[in-house]
Amino acid sequence: MRIHKIAVIPGDGTGPEVIREGLKVMEAASKKFGFGYEKTVFDYGGERYLKTGRILTEKEIKGLAKFDAIYLGAIGHPDVKPGILEQGILLKTRFGLDQYINLRPVKLYNAAFCPLKDKTEEDIDFVVVRENSEGLYKGLGEFKNKGTKREVAIQISHNTRKGVERCIRYAFEYTKRRNKRKKLTLCGKTNVLTYAWDLWQRTFDEVARQYPDITTDYAHVDATTMWFVKNPEWFDTIVTDNMFGDIITDLGAMIQGGMGIAAGGNINPEGVSMFEPIGGSAPKYTGKNVINPLAAICALGMLLENVGEIGAANAVETSVIKIVKTRLKSLSAGKMGYSTQEVGDLVVENL
Ligand code: IPM
Ligand code: MN
């Protein structure tokens, strides 16, 4: 039997609640589709940091590299200063395991949950390929004259040919494999950020020559946010840098029905990938059994696809679509008409 070794990091806030439902779905899928898995749970997150002062060590990252995939709930704690856990755990894992792609599908499962007027499920079905290892997220910069009236804060967007090219290549391959409209849009800011986006545009144009079957397009990031609202049907696959990808995928999550359903994968195509709901730790809903676990369950579906369980991955998505279309009243926390656990049970029943 195929056995997948899965590292589970429930993390903070509602992370543990949604991961519990995801694991329930994994258990059911493993029985139905005949695969095995070994899960190892890690307590990385804000609670551990507050108790022990430990964030995430190099050794712990090396430990995560031994798994077939990582399943993450959420990182972020109201009692910890912003940045410490996000940089020290989430970004450190993405960078440390060289998960250089952040893959974020934006798919509307039920038009009733879309805030855009007159948009159907066919209109909102695209994927954002976000560069996940460079750009402004690299943490390069400095203060000059800190705390004085002459203070200058410099934050550098660091883009390498290698980093940009591997991301763009992944996006072309993904567009080909996705096999929908075979269109790849580069989302950037060539009109102002003339160093970084010159490199991106040149690399994009060069790689595009090797994919004659794929239609290419370019949109400035500001215009992209406008098109997401006005004409989301124009998009198939979008490739962009780390910062822009972060911003446009929150908007993407809203047009697909909200954070309750938005999942993402931090992918190292040659190594270990990590899957997570993108909504964060949602402290105000913690422990109330009201948070929507579907984002975590969709992330599990992506994880299953990544480890080669295609049948199980498709079944998870089909089950999610079914309950989103026929059962849930809303995708938002507390308004679903069901508890967190009941939504998990519904996915299992319909698997
Ligand atoms: C995300 C999050 C993270 C990011 C934060 C928590 C560091 O917003 O996954 O989009 O900016 O990448
Ligand atoms: Mn974000």
Image (cartoon, rainbow, N blue to C red):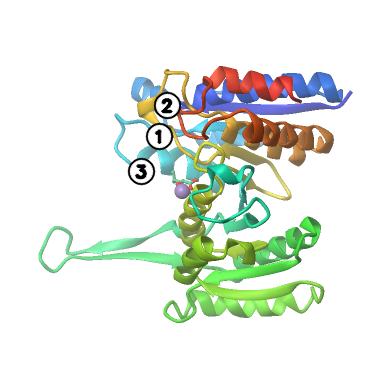
Q: Looking at numbered disc 1 in the image, what kind of residue is underneath it?
A: Gly
Q: Does the residue tagged 1 have its C-beta within 8 Å of any atom of ligand 1?
A: yes
Q: Residue at x 60, y 57 (%)?
A: 128
Q: How many marks?
A: 3
Label 2: few (<14), some (14–19) or many (≥20) C-alpha neighbours in 10 Å: many
Counting from the top left corner in percent of width and height, residue 233 is at 63, 62
Label 1: few (<14), some (14–19) or many (≥20) C-alpha neighbours in 10 Å: many
Residue with the mark numbered 3? 83
For residue 13, the mark is 2
276 and 214: which is toward the camera: 214
Q: Nearer the viewer, mark 2 or mark 1?
A: 2
Q: Element at badge 3?
A: loop
Asked if the residue at tag 1 contacts the one at tag 2, i.e. Cβ–Cβ closer than 8 Å, the answer is: yes
Q: Element at badge 1?
A: loop
Against 305, is 23 above or below?
Answer: above
Counting from the top left corner in percent of width and height, residue 232 is at 58, 61
Residue 41 seen by the camera: no
Q: Residue at x 56, y 38 (%)?
A: 261
Q: Nearer the viewer, mark 1 or mark 3?
A: 1
Q: Quadrant of residue 126?
A: bottom right
300 and 99: which is toward the camera: 300
Q: CA distance from mark 2 to mark 1?
A: 7 Å
Q: Does the residue tagged 2 have its C-beta within 8 Å of any atom of ligand 1?
A: no
124 and 89: which is toward the camera: 124
Q: Looking at numbered disc 3 in the image, what kind of residue is underneath it?
A: Gly
Residue with the mark numbered 1? 76
Q: Is residue 230 left or right of residue 143?
A: right
Q: CA distance from mark 1 to mark 3?
A: 9 Å
Q: Element at badge 2?
A: loop
* For marks 2 and 1 on the same chain, the one whose residue lies earlier in the sequence: 2
Q: Looking at numbered disc 2 in the image, what kind of residue is underneath it?
A: Gly
Residue 7 seen by the camera: yes
